[in-house]
């Protein structure tokens, strides 16, 4: 039937539609339906209140577990971000939906250690816990390495920062502080490889 062909196409990793990733299997046992992944990336941006120029923004690591039993694969993860641009460490909790091998949406609260300053200035700003972060991750096709898979990833996300009184920043300052790009790699491991 058509559902079987969709599943077969998706599980081969050749499908470009939004019917789940190559891990998607609606008939998998629960213990075999969890996919773990971890990624490391360098973050960058090109907008500050003073100039339009490529800027290194920090180093990020994130870890995620998702359920591949449903086509929209829900996940839960966390990240560790060294934010060189704002001078703080951030720890987001990420709720995600993985649409296929190539696209993932995520959002969640962010906890911050330190007192952030606006990128390229000495102006003090305040990080928001909630709303915290929203983003999308784009990935290359997976490369098999034994039981694991490797992807190159490009994220675009926006973190919320406010002025020290809690009010909204002007739009240019808000975009300068919060809009960041992340370029890196992701390693994926299905739970079936562990048990």
Image: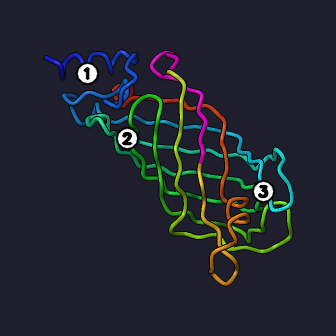
Q: Nearer the viewer, residue 150 or 2?
A: 2
Measure how far apart labels 2 and 3 are at the Cα level. 30 Å
Q: Which residue is mark 1?
A: 7
The 10 Å Cα crowd at callout 2, few under 14, some 14 to 19, many 20 or more, is many
Q: How does the figure colour the protein chain or chains? A: rainbow
Q: Which residue is mark 3?
A: 85
Q: Earlier in the sequence, mark 1 or mark 2?
A: 1
User: Along the polypeptide, which appears first: circle 1 or circle 3?
Assistant: 1
- For the C terminus, the image quarter is top left
Q: Residue at x 82, y 73 (%)?
A: 123
Q: Is residue 41 found left or right of 191 in the rendered image?
A: right
Query: Which x, y percent locates residue 29?
Result: 21, 31
Say which of 194 and 69 sits in front.
69
Q: Earlier in the sequence, mark 2 or mark 3?
A: 2
Which residue is tagged 2? 66
* Residue at the spot 29% in from the left edge and 35% down from the top edge: 71
Q: In this picture, is 116 found above or below 92?
A: below
The Cα atoms of the two marked residues, 1 and 2, are separated by: 18 Å
5 relative position to 41: left or right: left
Q: Does the magenta run of residues contain 66?
A: no
Indicate the position of residue 152 as horizontal and vertical percent values.
59, 28
**Toward which corner of the image does residue 9 lie, by quadrant?**
top left
Q: The N terminus lies in which quarter of the figure?
A: top left
Q: x, y percentage for residue 7?
A: 25, 21
The CA distance from mark 1 to mark 3 is: 43 Å
Crowd rating for badge 1 (residues with CA inside 10 Å; few <14, some 14–19, many 20+): many
Q: Do residues under tags 2 and 3 come within 8 Å of each other at their CB atoms?
A: no
Residue 178, by quadrant, is bottom right
Start and end of the magenta stretch?
142-156
Nearer to us in this view, 195 or 62: 62
Q: Does 146 appear in magenta?
A: yes
């Amino acid at each position: 039937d058509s559902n079987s062909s969709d599943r077969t196409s998706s599980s081969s990793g050749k499908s470009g539609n939004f019917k789940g990733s190559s891990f998607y299997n609606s008939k998998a046992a629960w213990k075999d339906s969890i996919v773990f992944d971890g990624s490391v990336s360098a973050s960058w941006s090109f907008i500050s209140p003073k100039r339009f120029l490529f800027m290194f923004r920090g180093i990020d690591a994130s870890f995620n577990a998702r359920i591949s039993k449903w086509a929209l694969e829900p996940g839960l993860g966390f990240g560790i971000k060294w934010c060189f641009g704002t001078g703080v460490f951030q720890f987001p909790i990420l709720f995600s939906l993985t649409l296929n091998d190539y696209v993932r949406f995520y959002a969640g609260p962010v906890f911050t250690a330190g007192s952030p300053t606006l990128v390229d200035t000495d102006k003090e700003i305040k990080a928001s816990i909630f709303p915290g972060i929203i983003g999308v991750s784009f990935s290359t096709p997976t490369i098999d390495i034994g039981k694991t898979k490797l992807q190159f990833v490009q994220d675009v996300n926006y973190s919320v920062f406010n002025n020290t009184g809690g009010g909204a920043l002007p739009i240019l300052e808000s975009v300068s502080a919060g809009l960041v790009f992340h370029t890196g790699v992701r390693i994926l491991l299905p739970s079936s490889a562990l048990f």
